[in-house]
């Protein structure tokens, strides 16, 4: 197969196609993320120094909770899980298996308050661009707004059920700007009552969101298998952290090696990714000549400062001040971003970077 390099496209020529996706709040993987973070919130509410790495798997009538928690707090795991299921729109009659243990003493040696080291090895990415006021890619913002709107819709119209996902196949200019949507694919769980009308509602919502950005949709694919009645844990298994690309930048930027949900902020998989995003936004705010910025942080478990910080804007490498290494220790990230006092469950619903 011979491939040719795309040259700068003239007006009217075919544009390059690129796709991104989101899953709705009721998708099994997203439900597991929300349960993990709801449990984390419950521990941090009672014990700001709780160490948590909580994983959830659900499917076929069972929800399995495992991982590590070291905390002085007592949390009613069963009640938290049932509350999340109810909020998402599902029944609560699941067998809930609590298999949580304590954090390894070996890990604790390097992450306690005296040492303040990173909770794991790894690299994290942050990204920002000027496509939207949120400094996120436009197609990503459109899907986030659809996911939020759908969640409100299903709470007020019982024909719409919690599970679902959506995908945009966008038409992009040679400068990487979204010029239109070739195909908008939406799979939404529903009662199959008045399908023609509910499909029309979905299309109208998508058109209204896209119109705010002067984006037109050429074609819709709505539940292309023909039916989507069985969903949630009855239709598919769910697992914490399996939607890391959705949680990050929808494939418009690199993704680090670790997921976010269920992890307290000493785990740099989460706090480092949040910090990298903040740095990328600051670069664009302070440098109007740049349109995009990518940041990579890397850490070693038990070591306080990052091993490396890499910043690239408009495909140019930027010099990293030494002071930024001090700013990016877990302790300073937690303090600067107030990471012991935020609601992580809210971040797990529609994407961790919805600002």
Image (spheres, rainbow, N blue to C red):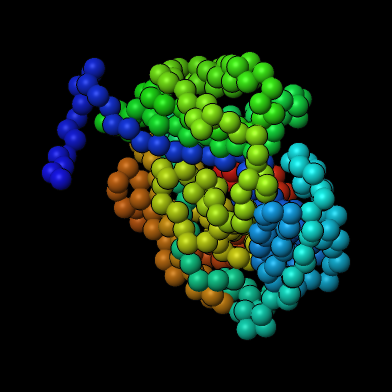
| Horizontal side of residue 102 vs 179, given as left or right | right
Q: Residue at x 42, y 26 (%)?
A: 183
Q: Residue at x 67, y 18 (%)?
A: 194
The image quadrant of residue 59 is bottom right
Q: Is residue 277 visible?
A: no
x then y, percent, for residue 259: 55, 58
Quarter the N terminus occupies: top left
Q: Residue at x 65, y 34 (%)?
A: 229
| Horizontal side of residue 74 vs 212, given as left or right | right
| Horizontal side of residue 24 vs 252, given as left or right | right
Q: Is residue 278 above or below residue 153?
A: below
The image quadrant of residue 72 is bottom right
Q: Is residue 13 above or below residue 337?
A: above
x then y, percent, for residue 167: 48, 34
Quarter the C terminus occupies: top right
x then y, percent, for residue 217: 44, 20
Q: Residue at x 73, y 58 (%)?
A: 63
The image quadrant of residue 90 is top right
> Count of labels shown?
0
Is residue 262 or residue 62 the one in the foreground?
Answer: 62
x then y, percent, for residue 144: 57, 34
| Horizontal side of residue 77 vs 68, given as left or right | right
Is residue 53 or residue 279 the one in the foreground?
Answer: 53
Q: Is residue 260 visible?
A: yes
Q: Is residue 141 above or below residue 280?
A: above
């Amino acid at each position: 197969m011979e491939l040719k390099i795309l040259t700068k496209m003239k007006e009217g020529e075919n544009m390059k196609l690129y796709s991104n996706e989101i899953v709705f709040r009721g998708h099994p993987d997203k439900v597991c993320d929300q349960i993990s973070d709801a449990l984390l919130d419950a521990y941090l509410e009672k014990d700001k120094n709780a160490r948590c790495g909580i994983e959830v798997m659900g499917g076929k009538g069972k929800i399995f909770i495992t991982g590590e928690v070291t905390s002085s707090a007592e949390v009613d795991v069963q009640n938290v899980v049932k509350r999340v299921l109810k909020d998402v729109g599902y029944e609560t009659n699941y067998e809930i298996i609590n298999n949580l243990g304590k954090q390894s003493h070996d890990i604790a040696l390097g992450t306690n308050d005296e040492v303040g080291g990173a909770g794991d090895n790894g690299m994290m990415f942050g990204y920002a661009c000027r496509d939207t006021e949120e400094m996120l890619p436009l197609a990503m913002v459109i899907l986030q707004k659809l996911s939020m709107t759908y969640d409100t819709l299903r709470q007020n119209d019982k024909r719409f059920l919690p599970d679902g996902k959506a995908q945009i196949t966008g038409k992009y200019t040679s400068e990487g700007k979204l010029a239109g949507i070739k195909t908008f694919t939406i799979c939404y769980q529903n009662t199959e009552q008045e399908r023609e009308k509910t499909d029309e509602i979905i299309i109208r919502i998508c058109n209204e969101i896209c119109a705010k950005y002067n984006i037109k949709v050429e074609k819709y694919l709505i539940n292309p298998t023909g039916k989507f009645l069985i969903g949630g844990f009855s239709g598919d298994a769910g697992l914490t952290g399996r939607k890391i690309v959705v949680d990050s930048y929808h494939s418009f930027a690199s993704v680090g090696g670790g997921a976010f949900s269920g992890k307290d902020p000493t785990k740099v998989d989460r706090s480092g990714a949040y910090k990298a995003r903040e740095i990328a936004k600051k670069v664009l705010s302070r440098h109007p000549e740049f349109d995009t910025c990518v940041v990579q942080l890397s850490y070693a478990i038990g070591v306080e400062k990052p091993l490396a910080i890499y910043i690239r804007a408009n495909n140019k490498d930027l010099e990293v001040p030494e002071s930024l290494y001090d700013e990016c220790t877990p302790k300073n990230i937690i303090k600067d971003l107030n990471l012991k006092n935020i609601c992580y469950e809210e971040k797990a619903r529609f994407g961790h970077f919805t600002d």
